[in-house]
Image (cartoon, rainbow, N blue to C red):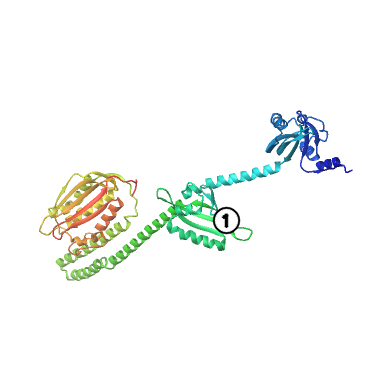
Amino acid sequence: MYDYVSLLKNIVDNTPLPIAVLIGTDLKIELANPAMISIWGKGNEVIGHKYFDVLPETPRHEIMTQALEVLNTGIPFYAKDKLIDLIIDGKVMQHYFNYSFTPLYGKDGNIYGLLKNGTDITDLHNIKQKIQSSDERLRIAVESSGMGTYEINLITKETVTSGNFNELWSVDEASDTEMLLKRMHPEDLPIREKAHQDALTTGKIVYEARIINDDKSERWVKVNGKIIKDQNGNASSIIGIIQDISDQRKFEKDLQQKIKESTKEIRESNENLIHFANMVTHDLKEPVRKIKIFNGLLKKEIEAEKIENIKKYSDKVDQSAERMQTLIEGTLAYSTLNKSIQQIQKINLNEIIENIKIDLELIIQEKDAILFTSELPEIEGAPILIHQLFYNLIHNALKFSKADEPPRVIITSKIVEYEGKKHVQIVIKDNGIGLDSAYAERIFNAFERLHSKDDYEGTGLGLALCRKITERHNGTITAAGQENDGAEFTVTLPLSQEKKTI
């Protein structure tokens, strides 16, 4: 007859699964295979001893409650990933177990004991913890970087996201790709489609697109992804990340704008250089020619001792030299106006006008001119530039006067609201030779002259300087008038400046 008892004992002893049989309510150890004895770490002399005498360090109340519940109800108990302290070689060691209590029934049908098995999953638990910790660190890194992750099932179109994806894509829940595509700017859909087509060859998805928010504003995102293939080599899913590149796009846009502005400044500078070259070729060349001619005549008259002609030719040389000096100083002032930084100060416009009257005292007396000035407000700006602005305008009003009528210059002002900010609007009106309304804008161009330099001295830069100065103060200047019926210049300047320098 075959010895089934020996066979069963041989199986139990050699199975790698830790097994023990506990009898009665005091849980006396009736059987423990080598695998269980090894886990307990108490040696081989454990049979016949009570469970908690052998393992006093285990959580007595909790395990006793579990065991008695199985003994009383016959319902097996299972525990997973449970922390249990074990004293092995005098040291307390933390172990994690999956264990169970299964009721054992006698011939009379009553429960007489428990089959206890347990698996030490400490290594598995630690690996799992490391993975979770790694996943958590990755999640924190992704969220703190402002990025979001996504996974798209290419078969079901189901989408799983994490991190900041939903916020970046401006959706409450990203359940499928159709929902996501509704948020993308229509103009960027072909870009996405091309990126996905290219990915069939490269395996990688890279594109940038605009996401439309609930408030209709736009956010730029960069999408990176990788196609995952199944065991048959067919594309099954896409995983990737998105990141907000709105700031980067704004920086690029601002940089492009600055480049555009710089290019415009360079173009204007080149145009000015052309003007300067023309002036050197023509305007400066002429007084030099005159100086040479009159100087030659002067030498002849000196030899002939004709005093009257000597004085006349000497005066002509002086006039040509003064003309050259005026042109050079005007050109220098115009070309360097934008280069120097000026501090913003409080400016009393009434004092500016009074100082200009003193500067122009001789021409005012010479032409019997009268200036009518109303009370002007205080503004913020660069005093030296504001003085130059009104000096040029008032000087022009006196210079372009009628030969048979004394100059009359009227300066008035009023406060106006422009773009939510208070400005002063100053009108300088004269009774001079006026101007054709067709040239009301052209006169502000550099080197633009409507009258012969023989009739009216000047560089053609005065009004160009005036426009530069008003624009630098965030203001405007316009001209109006009729021929032989006076001119009117309107200067609009803000009462206060936003910056401390201009």
Residue 413 is at least partly visible in this image: yes
Residue furthest out toward the left: 404
Residue 415: percent from the left, percent from the top?
Answer: 22, 45
Left or right of 450 on screen, residue 181: right
Residue furthest out toward the right: 1
The total of numbered circles placed on residues is 1
* Corner quadrant of residue 432: bottom left
SS type, badge 1: strand
* Corner quadrant of residue 329: bottom left
As drawn, 85 above or below 194: above
As drawn, 133 above or below 312: above
Residue 275: percent from the left, percent from the top?
Answer: 29, 64
Left or right of 393 on screen, residue 341: right
Left or right of 411 on screen, residue 201: right
Give the quadrant of the N terminus: top right
Q: Nearer the viewer, residue 122 or 372?
A: 122
The type of residue carrying mark 1 is Ser
Q: Nearer the viewer, residue 112 or 350?
A: 112
Residue at the disc numbered 1? 237
Q: Nearer the viewer, residue 393 or 173?
A: 173
Residue 390 is at least partly visible in this image: no
Q: Nearer the viewer, residue 127 or 314?
A: 127
Residue 199: percent from the left, percent from the top?
Answer: 54, 61
Residue appearing at x 35%, y 62% in the figure? 267
